[in-house]
Amino acid sequence: MKDAEKKSLHWTQIAERIVLSAFAAFLLYYAISGLAKGAIYMPSGRLAFRGTWFYGISAWLLGGAMICCAASAIYHVIRRFGQPYERKSWRLFRLSIRIVGWSMFVAAFVMCFLSSAAR
């Protein structure tokens, strides 16, 4: 029974790694393609057509926030399943990437709404 539990836990960890890696790859692709086009679309609400478009600096901030989120997911995949201990530098990286990412995300929304209010 214990071998079966260990094997299922192992496959659960592999599945979690695959899902997190796919999520990080999607975020990187979406951010880079949006920055290459010069606009990033953020869907919201129930309808797919209701959302917010980010242009210019707000698009760059949102793209940076997406890249920070992808870096955090990649960090989670590497550190969680690699070695159980955590060095101080890794904890500092995790904390700083979350603070920078959330700050960029909030700043992108503020800039987007301020620029649309000025029009």
Image: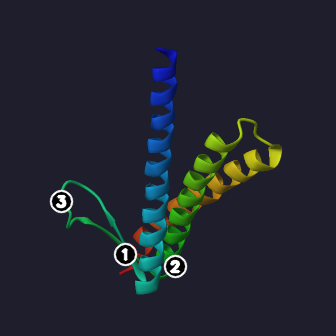
Q: Secondary structure at mark 3?
A: loop
Q: Residue furthest top?
A: 1
Measured as percent of width and height from the top left, residue 117 is found at: 37, 73
What separation in Å lies between label 1 and label 2 (alpha carbons)? 13 Å
Measured as percent of width and height from the top left, residue 29 is found at: 44, 71
- Mark 3, Cα crowd under 10 Å, few <14 / some 14-19 / many 20+, is few
Q: Nearer the viewer, mark 1 or mark 2?
A: 2
Image quadrant holding the C terminus, namely bottom left
- Mark 2, Cα crowd under 10 Å, few <14 / some 14-19 / many 20+, is some
Measured as percent of width and height from the top left, residue 71 is found at: 59, 59
Dot 2 amino acid type: Ile
Dot 3 amino acid type: Leu
Q: Secondary structure at mark 2?
A: helix
Q: Residue furthest right?
A: 88
Image height of 66 relative to 86, above or below = below
Measured as percent of width and height from the top left, residue 70 is found at: 54, 59
Along the line of sight, which residue is nearer the eye, 38 or 16? 16
What separation in Å lies between label 3 and label 2 (alpha carbons)? 26 Å
Q: Which residue is mark 1?
A: 116
Mark 1 / mark 2, whichever is N-terminal: 2
Residue 57: mark: 2
Image height of 52 relative to 34, above or below = above
Q: Secondary structure at mark 1?
A: helix
> Residue at 49% across / 55% down in the picture?
21
- Mark 1, Cα crowd under 10 Å, few <14 / some 14-19 / many 20+, is few
Mark 1 / mark 3, whichever is N-terminal: 3
Dot 1 amino acid type: Ser
> Residue at 74% across / 45% down in the picture?
91
Residue 103, image quadrant: bottom right
Q: Which residue is mark 3?
A: 47
Along the line of sight, which residue is nearer the eye, 81 or 55? 81
